[in-house]
């Protein structure tokens, strides 16, 4: 059996899923019309080093704590339908090729699970390894994270834990792939036999060229 792992934002999809979700809810009046601008400002603060990944998650998820889980689930279903036409055919074919070849496939993303799962369903990826959003006693989001975010070295450890629960390890597969756009994913890229840089950022492109890794532009 082979293993195929896929990052989400700017890899399987050519956009940021958190921004797509925020715009979707703002368009329905669930969030203020300024919410997309607020999200973009938080992302820029993260890039500038003024917010870490935990604070960025909090800024994205905490406003949803005003709503019950049933509402979030309903909007997630609508969001899934809205995203379906936006999936790149090339990436759909890529996932399908691995799936049809019998590979064990998983979406592995720093994105919170409730945003990632609609995309996993759309791509027909059976497993999701994602950042887990904490909930209060009523089942509402607090904005905090359960454990560590699925990010950088924690992304690799989360995959290792997921495989270990199935009595597997990356080295146990004849071939293993990980597709991503980000240098932040270097620990997991180095764990697989077939690392693939998809429309890579500057640092990942340089690393892929040095190491002779495959690069996908479109």
Image (tube, rainbow, N blue to C red):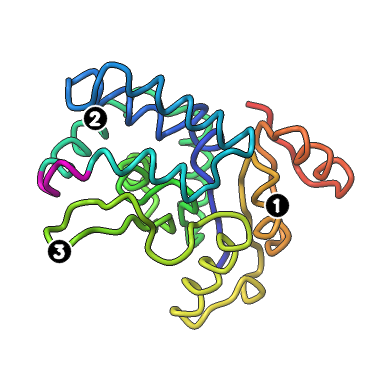
Which of the two marks, 3 or 1, is nearer to us in this view?
3
Image coordinates for residue 130, horizontal then vertical, percent: 43, 55
Q: Which residue is farthest right? A: 210
Q: Using the image, determine if residue 211 lies above or below residue 176.
A: above
Comparing 157 with 3, the one in front is: 157
Residue in front for this viewpoint, 166 or 40? 40
Percent x, y of residue 172: 62, 76
Residue 156 rendering spot, x and y as whole percentages: 60, 64
Quarter occupied by residue 23: top left
Magenta stretch bounds: 65-70
Which residue carries the number 1 mark? 195
- Marks 1 and 2, how far apart at CA: 31 Å
Give residue 4's quadrant in the image: bottom right
Q: How many marks?
A: 3
32 to 166, vertically: above or below: above
Quadrant of the rendering where the N terminus is positioned: bottom right
Q: Is residue 69 magenta?
A: yes
Q: Position of residue 60 (x, y in %)?
A: 37, 38
Label 2: which secondary element: helix
Spatial separation of the CA atoms under disc 2 and disc 3: 30 Å
User: Circle 2 is placed at which residue position?
Assistant: 81
Magenta stretch mostly in which secondary structure?
A: helix
Label 3 element class: loop
């Amino acid at each position: 059996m082979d293993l195929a792992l896929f990052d989400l934002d700017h890899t399987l999809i050519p956009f940021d899923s958190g921004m797509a979700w925020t715009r979707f809810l703002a368009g329905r009046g669930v969030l203020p019309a300024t919410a997309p601008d607020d999200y973009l400002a938080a992302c820029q603060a993260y890039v500038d080093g003024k917010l870490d990944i935990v604070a960025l998650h909090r800024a994205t998820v905490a406003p949803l704590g005003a709503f019950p889980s049933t509402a979030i689930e309903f909007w997630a279903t609508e969001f899934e339908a809205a995203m379906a036409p936006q999936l790149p055919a090339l990436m759909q074919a890529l996932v399908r090729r691995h799936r049809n070849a019998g590979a064990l496939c998983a979406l592995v993303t720093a994105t919170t699970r409730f945003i990632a799962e609609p995309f996993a369903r759309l791509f027909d990826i059976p497993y999701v390894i994602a950042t887990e959003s904490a909930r209060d006693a009523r089942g509402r989001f607090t904005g905090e994270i359960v454990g560590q975010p699925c990010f950088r070295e924690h992304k690799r450890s989360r995959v290792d834990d997921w495989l270990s629960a199935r009595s597997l390890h990356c080295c146990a597969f004849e071939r293993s792939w990980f597709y991503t756009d980000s240098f932040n994913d270097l620990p997991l890229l180095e764990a697989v036999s077939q690392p693939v840089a998809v429309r890579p950022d500057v640092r990942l492109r340089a690393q892929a060229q040095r190491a002779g890794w495959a690069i996908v532009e479109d």
